[in-house]
Amino acid sequence: MRRAYDLLEKNPMIVALSGWGLLFLALYWKVLVGGNVFVFIDASRFFFPMWKWGSEVLRQGIIPLWNPDVQFGAPYLADPQTACAYPLIGIFYTWLSPINAFSALIIVHHFWCVVGTWVWMREQDFSAKASFGASLIFGFSLHVICSAWTPVALITISWLPWVLTGALRVHARKKRAFLWLSFAWAMQLSAGYPVLVYLTGLAMLGHLAWKSLREKGVNSFEKFTWLLPLTGSVAIAVLYNLVWGLPFLEYFQNSNYQSGAHRTEDLSWGHLGTFLDPFISGHPLDGKNPGIDYWVGTYFVGLPTIFLLVWGIWKGSYRKNSLALWIVFLVLSLGWTLRIGGWLKSFLPGYSLVIHSGFWLSLVLLWVAALTMEVMEEVVGTEERFKWRWTLLVLLLYGGTWALKSPYFPIFYWCSGVFLAFVPWVTSSKGRAWTLLGSLLLSLGPAAWSMDTTLDRSYYERPPEYLSRLDKPGRFFFSPITIARGVHLQGKDRVDAYEGAKEDLYPNWPLAYGREEVPVYNTMQLKGPSIWTFRAFQYSLQESRMALDYLGLRYIFGAAHFSGLRKIEAGDQVTIYENPSASAKWFSVTRALSAAPDVEDDLGLISRKNIDLGTTCFVLGADQADRYSKRDVIEKERNADRVDLLALGKGRALIISSETEAPGWKARVDGKDRPIELINHAFRGVRVQEGESRIELRYEPRSFRLGLFLCLLVTGFWTTALLTFAKN
């Protein structure tokens, strides 16, 4: 042990990498050598199928700007959670299979988070042992472990310590600090969870302001000169991310993201109990707890961490990081419980988008790691003994809330407490450091290892059995009850629940196997088609049945009471029906009526007049309301961002669709530009004149082209700066 400690002091990074490697092998051995894959919560029901879809489009040499296979067509690149501007997603999915790329992204970024915590601590002149301890506390906290359930959250969190490291270097006026910070912040912003980047910025400002106010011998102006390079780095990071940011802003007001500010999900006083007992309300894998709140509702950082935090408060040990700032983060993490979150939303720009107060958890726990290790350095570096009665008090609280009842290796937790209790009796500083780190591992390790959220890779490799029976083209439609069942898994155990959900094709799974779906779950949804679809089914059975045909809904999952549907044999949880009369995505109508200002008026007219949506549509503009000739429409070619049609027949025609109309879609008819018509308040249509037949539709948003130019400009700046520094 002594030789290992000496080695840590002489070659700290090598020893730290070896330690992390062993811990990651122990934590992820089922994935690294056992062939398992991550499946829990949104990992399998959103990110795996969505990224697999995007990677397959990219392999065709097409940038996936638009996803025609989800909803009735929706932006792909513009959705922050697809993280299209994050380089490693494209690189991993190019080099590796979708399953291996998905697993690699999670493990690599968890490792990156651990290494980043070490670098951030070293930047603050912490010792190697304290930096290693902080990397364990933050990197193996249940908050970070469970962030793998929402991979973009884990990727975003993994860049948090790197961004803070860049900020410290800017504050210290070091060379290349601006380059470091701009790149780290750009990567964090592109990772897919912008609200965490926003909170990182608030925390960074607070931390640097605190450090500046504590500086002595520096005039007031010079104390805050870091604001200029900090602002510049923000500008560079934002410019890089305009490749998806500009398209996102283009759709924001007309998407479900716009209503995010009206939702809040706050933590309670009870969540603070997870500091001592992470499973105070049950383990997320025991089948009783859905677990969705764990990455934004669990404060667990291990028994020794809490003890050292209390010890440091009692001794007043904190100098390198602000205890007051940590308390602010802790209070904000409770949100409306203390009413401060609501107060901030009333005046702080952008804070209304912080719908989960638990989004503060990564900052709360990173600061806990730093504060705790500052105390550990004081404890192991002096001959002063602990007041062991404090240890016993914490042990009693801890044992009463968890260790006596926990089914997850309670012996290890008691061993952790015993290690901690014996620290005062260890005479050498090296011995005390190793005893504390050992106690920390025994406390954090079993909780982390109990989170086995993986299944055999065949879970992704083997298509759901039902797909072989659903052999006709067309959209899959999920009833609200079916979607609710997919969100709240059911089964006799975890494997049974996930296998059942897979076989029932819960939302987003069809995308992983080349099929189209119309669920309303966890993706960027445009309001027009969602509103039209929801309201169209609020009238008579006859109108709802006609809407099924018009929308091209071939397979209906869940209870359906319409005539003309064919029941398909299905599982115990869901029944599937085939709609034989589902329309093609593009077809010709013979009559167009002038659309009313509100979609409800037109839907009411359809119900009262028994208007056939197969022959009649509503078009924006009274001058377009007219009679048209019937054409036979053939879809010649299609990919993510393009549709080529052939309209056979004579006379002036109106070709309409059940595909979403959105900014960026352009039409050409026989090589000539033609405006796209807004059909039925939400969908696309094109007019064809006598003698015309070839229709080309392209998705070419100007916002993307401008954003791509700025992104490439920033990339060129980084490359040039890096080469210049390398030469010098």
Image (cartoon, rainbow, N blue to C red):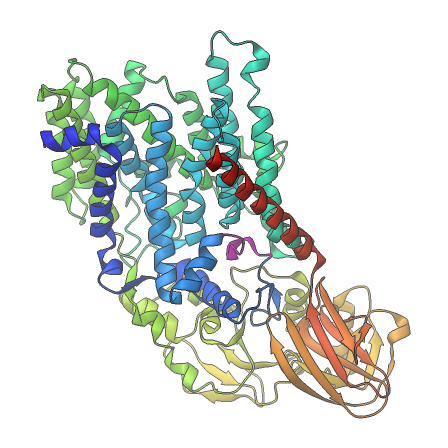
Q: Position of residue 510 (x, y in %)?
A: 47, 73
Q: Which region shows up in magenta?
A: 78-86
User: Is residue 408 depicted above or below 626 in this figure?
Assistant: above
Q: Can you see residue 622?
A: yes
Q: Residue at x 75, y 85 (%)?
A: 588
For the N terminus, which image quadrant? top left
Q: Is residue 507 visible?
A: no
Image location of residue 377, percent across then percent down: 25, 21
Is 211 or 575 nearer to us in this picture? Answer: 211
Q: Place residue 122 in its image quadrant.
A: top left
Asked if residue 270 is positioned above or below residue 108 in the image, the reply reads: above
Queried whether the magenta region covers residue 87, the answer comes back as no
Identified at 15% across, 20% down, the residue is: 429
Q: Main secondary structure of the magenta part?
A: loop
Whether 81 is among the magenta residues is yes
- With respect to residue 173, does 477 lie above or below? below
